[in-house]
Image: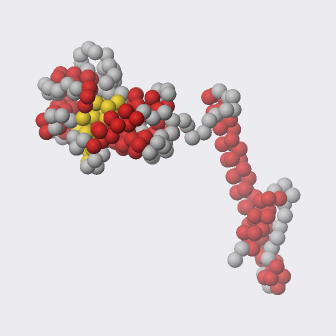
Amino acid sequence: MYNKNMNNKLQDFLNRGDCYFIHYASNGFYNGSSPAPNVSCIVIFNKKTQKGFRFSLKDHLQGHSTEEAERLSLENFKLLFDRYPNVSFIHWNMTANGFGFKAIQQRAKELGVELPTIPDENLFDLSSYVSYIAEKKLSIKQILWFNSLLYGDDFLDGKTEAEYFDKGRYEEIYNSIELKIKGFAEIVDLIKDNKLKTEPPYQNNDGLTKEERHREAVKRSQMRKKMINDIYEHNRKVQAHNERVMEQMEESEYAEDEGIFYYNSEHPIISLFASWFANWK
């Protein structure tokens, strides 16, 4: 269910030279009081110029405390507003009370950095439009998964990003945020082409609970492992058998012309494949 007015608004943002996709990571949710959560990384990306920037405390750690590095990264982020006073952002639910621009602004203020308040007309909430299209609220991970935009193991949920902050795993946090930003840019292309998927690639209609599906998956895994072990054992016996036969028939014209065939009534299919492999040239 695409909205022409929203599509036009989205296209207007994309046409701006000072419009960026934006996402960030912190070590918790903002509850409106001080101190605000630490900001570990902010990533922005301009789709028109194909240029992105990161503001990560990791880049300022050498010779500085974690808090000082965080302050320096937020000071660099402020330079964006100095350069583009009318900068616009396409974001994912960053106008929420517990997460987003307010939390970043408050944390920056605590560190002595004054960030401007971004007017509503310079913000486009991609999550709201995706929810409108899907007719239900979707998480970042869901929409990326539905559209095959989850690459590798870089994606982290917010809770994990917060835990990684405490462990100093800042580069992994950045990789996660960068993946999400690139995903947003591709989601926009899918919206424009009317190809955005809002349902999972498959549906579970088996009536099983999550725990029951897990037990079934474990059972299937054990069965596959047993089957592989059976094949290995069978092939070991086959190889030993063929070696004995070849020793006995080394000079036999029949062995040279007709090949070797063996059959095991307990493994008829495997026997056929093993016979084919033994005689393949």
Location of the C terminus by quadrant is bottom right
Answer left or right for 142 relative to 266.
Answer: left
Answer left or right for 215 relative to 238.
Answer: left
Question: Residue at image x 13%, y 39%?
Answer: 83
Question: Residue at image x 37%, y 33%?
Answer: 5
Residue 55 on image: x %, y %: 23, 38
Question: Residue at image x 42%, y 33%?
Answer: 3
Question: Residue at image x 41%, y 43%?
Answer: 192
Q: Quadrant of residue 275?
A: bottom right
Residue 276 on image: x %, y %: 75, 69
Residue lying farthest to the front in this orientation: 4
Residue lying farthest to the top in this orientation: 33
For the image, the number of numbered tags is: 0
In the image, residue 227 sits, relative to residue 12, either above or below, namely below
Q: Is residue 61 visible?
A: no
Residue 72 on image: x %, y %: 16, 34
